[in-house]
């Protein structure tokens, strides 16, 4: 069970890297878009996050439900921005910075809450 948890954590990090990296490489660019890395990263984060919580609930580990709830809400907002932003070319600046900032916020909640 420990191996499965570690594998899910690794995949969760890969999802974060794809989502954040897909946006970060466009910071200096003039025409920002939602790329495939951002879409797949958001989906990977959602699926692996839910599986990690389910695995923790099945075991005897304590689950911080406030942290999970905050991360889920933030990720759902990021997911909505990503999926709705796929059709916009170029992506409005506020929309882009919202995706990037909320993704970073989600990582900060994971570390500090």
Image (spheres, rainbow, N blue to C red):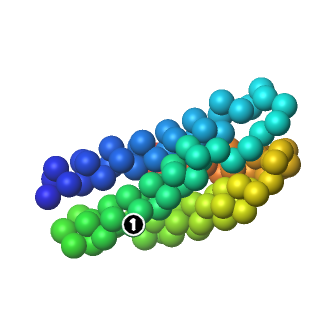
Q: Is residue 51 left or right of residue 5?
A: right
Quarter containing the N terminus: bottom left
Vertical arrangement, residue 39 with respect to residue 77, above or below: above
Q: Which residue is mark 1?
A: 50
x then y, percent, for residue 6:
24, 48
x then y, percent, for residue 13:
41, 43
At a point 60% along the width and 38% down the height, the residue shown is 22
In this view of the protein, can residue 67 be seen by the observer?
Answer: no
x then y, percent, for residue 3:
16, 50
In this view of the protein, can residue 21 be seen by the observer?
Answer: yes
At a point 21% along the width and 73% down the height, the residue shown is 58
Vertical arrangement, residue 14 with respect to residue 82, above or below: above
Q: Is residue 32 left or right of residue 99?
A: right
Q: Exactly how many numbered labels are in the figure?
A: 1
Q: Residues within 10 Å of mark 1 (few under 14, many from 20)?
A: some
| Towards the viewer: 108 or 36 | 36
| Towards the viewer: 21 or 1 | 21
């Amino acid at each position: 069970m420990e191996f499965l948890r570690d594998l899910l954590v690794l995949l969760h990090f890969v999802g974060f890297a794809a989502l954040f990296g897909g946006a970060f490489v466009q910071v200096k660019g003039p025409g920002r878009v939602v790329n495939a890395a951002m879409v797949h990263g958001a989906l990977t984060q959602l699926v692996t996050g839910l599986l990690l919580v389910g695995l923790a609930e099945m075991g005897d580990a304590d689950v911080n439900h406030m942290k999970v709830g905050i991360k889920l809400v933030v990720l759902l907002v990021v997911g909505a921005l990503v999926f709705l932003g796929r059709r916009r070319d170029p992506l409005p600046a506020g929309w882009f910075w919202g995706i990037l900032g909320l993704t970073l916020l989600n990582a900060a909640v994971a570390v500090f809450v």
